Amino acid sequence: MLNSHWPSGNVVFACELNDQSALDSIDRPYLSSDQRRFGGVNLNSSYSNPGTLVVDGIPYAIPRGSTGAAPRASLISASYNPTDSAQTHRIIPSQISESVFGKVRQGFGSSSQVTQVDAASLKSIQRQRGIRLFESPR
């Protein structure tokens, strides 16, 4: 912020830069599809990687690191690979905002003055994969 004055006027100039990093749901343990530790239910999904095979109604968890050619004996019977789908989301995207403000006042004589006030702001929001979600006009 800059400020200056003289007998017949003044000038004020201010700028602000706000750079907010993203907040992912994995950073907040209470944002989970498995709410059992809080007295809720487990809503984890069985659609995951590695997946789960269901044969004759019996689930078989595919072991991690499998190439897809694992023998049946390596499958884990009566279990599945759950995915906490709530942990893969971004709660708040990364945001950058820039703002400027300026004001100049100049007096002429004892009864007249000129005042100029300007303000501008730019905001940019990015999605999870770096794709720009929103940018305000300049």
Image (spheres, helix red, strand yellow):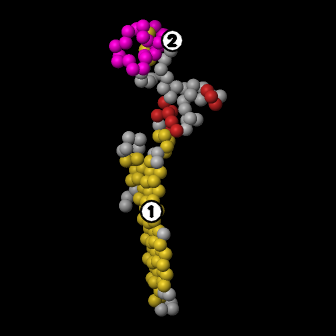
Residue that numbered label 2 is attached to:
78
Q: Residue furthest front?
A: 65
| Residue 81 inside the magenta-drawn segment | no
- As helix, strand or loop, the secondary structure at mark 1 comes to strand
- As helix, strand or loop, the secondary structure at mark 2 comes to loop
Compared with residue 20, is residue 88 higher up or lower down, i.e. above or below?
above
The region drawn magenta spans 56-77
Residue 54 is marked as: none
Compared with residue 82, is residue 119 higher up or lower down, i.e. above or below?
below
Q: CA distance from mark 2 to mark 1?
A: 58 Å
| Residue 54 makes an appearance in the image | no
Instruction: Residue type at mark 2: give it.
Output: Ala
Compared with residue 69, is residue 105 higher up or lower down, i.e. above or below?
below
Instruction: Please state if 40 lies on the left or on the right of 117 as rendered.
Output: right
Measured as percent of width and height from the top left, residue 34 is found at: 56, 28
Of residues 73 and 119, the one nearer the viewer is 73
Q: Determine the residue positioned at 48% across, 92% down.
A: 109
Q: Residue furthest right?
A: 39
Measured as percent of width and height from the top left, residue 117 is found at: 45, 73
Instruction: Residue type at mark 1: give it.
Output: Ser
Q: Residue furthest bottom?
A: 109
Q: Which badge, 2 or 1, comes first in the chain's sequence? A: 2
Residue that numbered label 1 is attached to:
99
Q: Determine the residue positioned at 49% across, 43% down.
A: 23
